Image (tube, coloured by chain):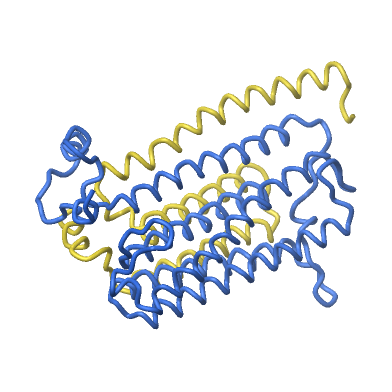
Amino acid sequence: MTDAALANTGAALTRPTGWRGIVADWSSDQRAFKNVSWGKAMMWIFLLSDTFIFSCFLLSYMTVRSSTTVPWPNPSKVFALTIGDTTIPLILIAIMTFILISSSGTMAMAVNFGYRHDRVKSAVLMLVTAAFGATFVGMQGFEWTKLIMEGVRPWGNPWGADQFGSSFFMITGFHGTHVTIGVIFLIIVSRKVLRGDFDREARGFFTSRKGHYENVEIMGLYWHFVDLVWVFIFAFFYLW
Amino acid sequence: MAQAAVAHVEGQQHPIKLYLVVWGWLFVLSTCSYLVDYFGIHGYLRWSLILLFMILKAGLIVAVFMHMAWERLALMYAILVPPVLVLVFVGIMVFESNYTLFTRIIFFGAGT
């Protein structure tokens, strides 16, 4: 298979839009996603599968929470922090939310500067994104430490239903793992951008496919997804 | 959709201002959802506000940051429709957990 066949996304052709476009795209030969490269399409499909994984976690959390006869611990109090003399409910989680949203903002701009071939700005913004991500994981580590010190375990806790601990560690742990993997890949991709790999279309060490600035956008898709999952975790686990 | 054809000449190119505006809105919406907890709003108002802010935030992230708004419908529907079916699973598990709760109250008594 030649690279031209993989990289040519056929964007130049005019294609039907709307429902006719869906039918035409899906019933056509060769490929269903007409102006999207395979790398991007596969990232979307991976994210779809990841959506199902997180959906299952949140669903199991919903099931144990609504089927227990013991009161659920109040997240507003459990995740409160005492700064000075005032106890502010859920403050750490709010700060973590703002950090992750900010990281999404810098990532979106990194993608933009990548397509403009502004290597330094793109790489720096990605490193800022990675720094935000690392800060987020650090704060999550602090959160875990605090809760473990207070006696939260996967099989019990001092405030209520035993299932609270297992849901908390499972959901936030899996999300934190995603963030950590994202940080590692952000550093790898920003190094490639800075080196000019995507200007020379250098081949990747793993796929040996030619690199393009679209790789930055694909990286961005993963990162925004991590932020997206946090939106749901924040709503369902921390606020509900 | 005519926009999409232009945007794909070389990847997704949109003005930086758009991202900054969305970023600002995400901050506002996050603050709103935090304030729901801060002011201790309870009951159906709390749940509907949480869901509203959550859906608006998720929509902004997917549509603008992930560029879904400029993709062709074939990709949009392929990615966005399957997660909606999770709602069926939610329905099943609501039934299931109600039943579990019922049997626990019947056989073990409340509060154990």
**Residue at figure coordinates x 87%, y 46% from the top left:** A157
Q: Is residue B66 left or right of residue B51?
A: left
Question: What is the x, y in percent for residue A143?
Answer: 76, 62
Question: What is the x, y in percent for residue A139?
Answer: 70, 67
Q: In this view, does A66 lie above or below B17?
A: above
Which residue occupies the foreground of this view, A123 or B112?
A123
Residue B97: tell me if it is visible.
yes
Q: In this view, does A208 lie to the left or right of A140?
A: left
**Residue at figure coordinates x 37%, y 69% from the top left:** A111
Q: In this view, does B37 lie to the left or right of A219?
A: right
The image quarter containing residue B74 is: top left
**Residue at figure coordinates x 34%, y 75% from the top left:** A113
Q: Is residue A6 left or right of residue A218?
A: left
Question: What is the x, y in percent for residue A118?
Answer: 32, 80
For the colour blue, the matching chain is A
Which residue occupies the foreground of this view, A169 or B100?
A169
**Residue at figure coordinates x 23%, y 41% from the top left:** A31
Q: Which residue lies furthest to the bottom in this view?
A: A120
Colour chain B appears in: yellow
Q: Which residue lies furthest to the left in this view?
A: A14
